[in-house]
Every structure is written in structure tokens, then in C-alpha cells.
Image: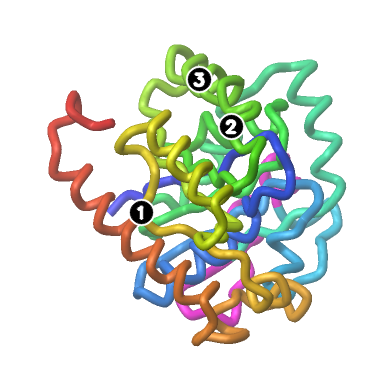
Amino acid sequence: MTAKILALANQKGGVGKTTTAINLAASLAMLEKLVLLVDFDPQGHSTTGLGFPKPDHRAGAFALMKGAPVHALMLQTEVPNLQVIPAGKDLAQLEFELYELPQLQVLRDSLRPVMDYYEYIIIDPPPSLGMITLNALTAADEVIVPMPCEFFALDGLAELMETLHRIQGGPNPRLQLGGILLTMAEERTNLGAAVAQEVRQAFPGKVFQTMIPRNIRLAEAPSHGKPVAFYDLKSKGAQSYLSFAREWIERDKHQEGQPEGMRA
């Protein structure tokens, strides 16, 4: 078993990227998959959203990128089968260091010692297309793009796709677009339905069927340091992410069954 590495990416903030990282990781773990979540965002929201304080420079993602052994940095969450590597604001200084001496393989090389243990490694990079995010995309096998059902949803997506193509043509030819996840959905509104239709037409076959609704429990859960399923399992938010995790597993099985040249 070699872990499949997923990166969550969108250069716009407030799209549900970290919410998806936390809750997809937790949902996969609840479905008995071994999962490591790497908080790779200096804001550290995946860290605090799972109930941990932001680490200092001797621990977490910053230390990982500086050569600390990955095994020493992983924290066990309250979700069985889910560990996390935390992040804090010190990670931000890596943006300048990596830019001055471009190194795009550091993260993948740092994760290599645990890639035969986990089934999924999920990376939550910052909402930008800087060197930290490029490291995440170079480490990843697939990228999932959370996109809100809002009027400007497609703004900036062309730039992200151009970046993915550059990565595919350079440091990471195995990188694939795993799919687009529609978030903050309000299915009963004309706008939400129109945006969903527009995105599905623009990216045929690449938009997940599961849509993540606006949900108060989903918004409240991070302040309690819990994935939404551990805060309110019966909520629409929790059930939607469990549905998404199941859809992802099925899509992953289907992709593995295809010849390499046929994979999307």
C-alpha cells in the first residue's frame, strides 16, 4: 500500500478549503481508512479545527520542511485512524526561503517515510499560488478544488488550472485533477443551481455529485476543535462530507481500475 496524496487547492480564501480538508480526512478515517492530514497553511486552521494549539518552530510542518523526521511530528486526533501534522505562522517564512532557492520536492521527500503506512495523505496549503502551495501540488497525486456556489465562483479558476498544467509539464507529471467540490450550496436558490450548472458544463465529468451545503453545525464545529461528524453526526454538514468521502473512495477505485493513459 502506498498512500495517495491529495492536495486541496484554491487561491481564493473562504471557499471551504480547510473545512473540506478536516472533514474529508475525518470522514475517510471513519470509513476505516488510515489518513494523515498535513496542515500546510501558516494560518493553522486545520490544526486548531482539530483541537490542537499551533506549534512552535520545533514542531509541525515547518520542522518537517527543515528536516525533522515525520514520525516525530504527527499528532493523534480524537478520530481513530486520523493523525495530523500541525502548522503555525512560522511556516510563512518558508515562502521566502523556497522562493530564493526553489525547491519543489521537499514536502514529498519529507513524507516518503510514511507513504507505505497511510492510505490517504491530505494536504491543506494556503489560499494562494505561492511556493508553499507549489510544494503541495508537487507532492500530490491529485488535487481537489473546493468551489463555492457563488456568482464569482469561476473567477481565478483559469489561473489555478494553468498552474496545474505547469506542474504537470514540469516537476510533477503524475498530478491529476481529482475533481471540483461544490461548497456552500443552497440548492433551493436559483443562483446556487445556476452556478452548479455552469461549473458542471465547464468541467464535464470533473464535478463531484455530492454538494456541501451551508450548515450552521459545519460552521460551529471548528470552534469546538472537532470535525463536524464528532460535533453533530446527524447534521447535514456531517452527512454531506461522509457522502463525499464515499463518493471519493468509489471514484478512486474506478480510477485505479483504468489503464494509466485513460485516467482523467
Disc 2: which residue:
154
Residue depicted at x 40% and y 58%: 210
Disc 3: which residue:
167
Disc 1: which residue:
209
Amino acid type, callout 3: Ile
Q: Is residue 64 magenta?
A: yes
Q: In this view, does 25 lie to the left or right of 75?
A: left
- From mark 1 to mark 3, how far is it between C-alphas? 27 Å
- From mark 1 to mark 2, how far is it between C-alphas? 18 Å
Q: Does the magenta stretch include residue 45?
A: no
Q: In this view, does 245 lie to the left or right of 83?
A: left
Q: In which quarter of the image is residue 235?
A: bottom right
Select label 1 or label 3 by which is in front.
1
> Which stretch is magenta?
61-83
Residue depicted at x 38% and y 49%: 208
Looking at marks 2 and 3 on the same chain, the residue that comes earlier in the sequence is marked by: 2
* Label drawn at residue 233: none
**What secondary structure is marked by label 3?**
helix
Q: Is residue 68 visible?
A: no
